Amino acid sequence: MKLQNKVAVVTGAASGTGKAIAELFAREGAKVMVSDINIDGAKEVVSGIEKNGGIAAAVYANVANEADVSAVIDFAVEKFGTLDILVNNAGIMDEFMPCLLYTS
């Protein structure tokens, strides 16, 4: 288990790539904070991780809100004692255009 005793936060982890990353980290021994705007989906991911013997917790976060992001980090440290890995997988895309045209 390559990530034994590590703590990871994965944003956008209720589905898709974020879910796969959270599940992989858990299989490798990490304690995983599953963060998403879809809290029900995040809880389902946690349930799956726990059924396979992993340790995880779900937390709501909208990464467009700085206070939510800070709360996720604080909760991870409170729940698991530390934070070793952050995967900022969640994305915010209101308009589809080349990334160089975005100003914020």
Image: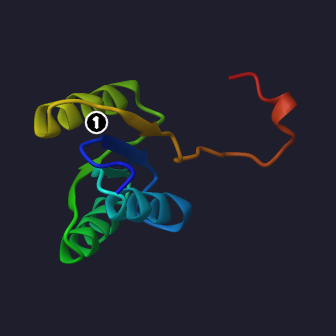
Q: Could you tell me which quadrant the C terminus lies in? A: top right
Q: How many marks?
A: 1
* Quarter residue 47 falls in: bottom left
Residue 36 x/y as whole percent: 38, 52
Q: Position of residue 38 (x, y in %)?
A: 36, 60
- Residue 18 or residue 49, whichever sits in front: 49
What residue is pinned by disc 1?
72
Q: Is residue 53 above or below residue 101?
A: below
Pick the front one: 23 or 61 = 23
The residue at 48%/65% (across/down) is: 20
Nearer to us in this view, 17 or 64? 17
What is the quadrant of the N terminus in the image?
bottom left
Q: Is residue 16 above or below residue 68?
A: below
Left or right: 69 as drawn, with respect to 88: left
Q: Residue at horizontal 22%, vertical 56%?
A: 56
69 vs 6, nearest the viewer = 6
- Could you say where residue 100 lies in the image, as x and y percent from the top left? 86, 29
Q: Quadrant of residue 83?
A: top left
Q: In the rendered image, which quarter is residue 101 located in?
A: top right
In the image, residue 76 sits, relative to residue 59, either above or below, namely above
Q: Amino acid at mark 1?
A: Val
Q: Is residue 13 above or below residue 102?
A: below
**Residue with the most extreme front position:** 1
